Image: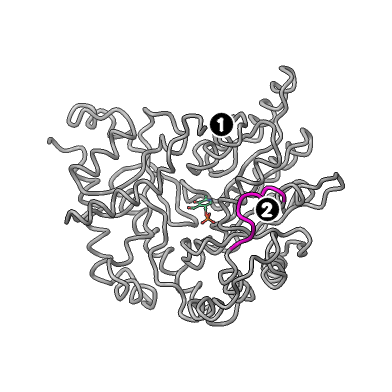
Amino acid sequence: MTAGVQPSATLAIGEALNALRLQGRDVLPMASGEIRLPAAPRLQQELRTATEHNDYGPVAGIESYREAAAGYWRRRGVDADTSRIITGPGSKALLFASLLALGGDVIVPRPSWVSYTAQATLAGLHVIEIDTVPGAGGVPDPDAVAAAARTARRSGRSIRVVVTTLPDNPTGDIAVTDIVQRLTDVAREHDLIIVSDEIYYDLAFDEASVRGASPINFAPERTIVTTGLTKNLAVGGWRTGFALFPQRGESPSLFDSVCTAASHIWSSPTMPVQHAAAYALTEPPEIVAWMSAALHLHRSVARAANSVLRTEGLLLPETRGTCYLYPDFSLHRDALRAVHNVESSAGLTDLLLRKYAVAALPGSAFGDPHDKLTVRLSTSQLYGSTVQQQQQALDSPDPLTLPWIVENLARLHDAVSALHLPA
Ligand SMILES: Cc1ncc(COP(=O)(O)O)c(C=O)c1O
């Protein structure tokens, strides 16, 4: 029973776009956050040479991978050791297993990534959506979290988990440290576990803005961090993921419960991928150089797209990391209703696709009310339609001068500026 849960909107639109492409339609692909870049050559080579590993291996992952993951966190200033690290086939699977193991009611930020609510619902958990405050994308308003915890307790329920995203999908925002710290205070007061999804951590445009902004810096005893190589190394299809669990005295520990769930669901992450991931996480120079080139590209294109939207009068947070823009079209509400009969975010993305050949996801897919005219746009597939173009974009000191990127940004501009014109 999937209890009315819809398929992932991001994966569904990716498949729909592929189908449109096969029909010969030229659509500006801004719906999916998949990073369309060729993987680092040395990393591909590591994967190829690891195919001889065909055993299952330990459920939590091989020691070298977990040690490399611990090293990754220690370089970030986070205390970590292999006894608290579980690797999995994508951080998505680790998030689900964590929610399953934790139980209780779950608070998710609104708006937030499409899968938190779906996963909690699939795990049979009750979800409470709490709005984020401006300047704190990915973190639910701490005061509202405290109020929800009190209300739940009065009615005999128990909120066990609060989910945060750093940097945030869909807004591209990074919560200011003060709000993160307030949330951790509330979590401590109401005995909540924080699940901090940090899959975009290495895609923060300014490292200083994200360093220290993780809940684990303030409440390591109650924070689970999940991440992976999907975004920083563009290997989503390899399904890498690793999670750091807190040191807790209870038995079975969260770590044990997640391992139990993993042993019955995925057994162990794909063995050759674990070896390649272990190599990448030691951050050899060629991987560091690849990540820094990719970050430069994401930053350049996302910021340029952000200013295209602002110039058109749309309201949106500064994109401080990720590849996402989350404009609010409410200033165009009257024109959209009068000219296009559009009154919802789903109507708006439908119009963008049908009339202007721009693929985007509606804010309602991220939990926003249907009539709030928010749209999530991703820049991660504007880097080129061929592997050669993508590689050139990655190698370019100034990707904004590449003709196909110039053209993609111009198409975005033209679509947005035409929206409020007569049909
Ligand atoms: C916020 C967020 N968390 C988690 C994931 C899942 O990543 P993974 O490939 O590690 O399962 C995504 C993927 O788009 C995401 O946007």
Q: Which residue type carries mark 1?
A: Glu
Marks 1/2: CA distance? 31 Å
Crowd around label 1: few <14 · some 14–19 · many ≥20 (10 Å):
some
Residue 127, located in which quarter of the rendered image? top right
How far across and down, in percent of the image, does residue 327 sit?
A: 37, 43
Residue 87 visible in this rendered orientation of the protein: yes
Q: Looking at the image, which residue is at 65% across and 49% down?
A: 264
Q: Where is residue 303 in the image (x, y as percent from the top left)?
A: 39, 58
The answer to if 156 sits in the magenta stretch is no
Q: Is mark 1 on a helix, strand or loop?
A: strand
**Magenta region:** 260-269
Q: What residue type is labelled 2?
A: Ser
Pick out the residue farthest to the left.
423
Name the image quarter holding residue 51.
bottom right
Mark 2, residue position: 263
Q: Is residue 186 above or below residue 320?
A: above
Residue furthest top in the image: 155
Q: Residue 129 carries which label?
A: 1
Q: Residue 276, position in %: x, y?
A: 57, 74
Front residue (pair 50, 388): 50
Q: Which SS does the magenta portion mostly show?
A: helix
Which of 280 and 290 lies nearest the eye of the viewer?
A: 280
Please report the residue visible at 33 percent of the width from the left and 42 percent of the height from the top.
Answer: 314
Of pointers 1 and 2, the one earlier in the residue sequence: 1
Q: In this view, does 393 lie to the left or right of 146?
A: left
Asked whether residue 76 appears in the rendered view, the answer is no
- Where in the figure is residue 221, as x and y percent of width and height? 79, 49
Above or below 417: residue 85: below
Q: Is residue 230 above or below residue 176?
A: below
Indicate yes or no whether the magenta region holds residue 268: yes
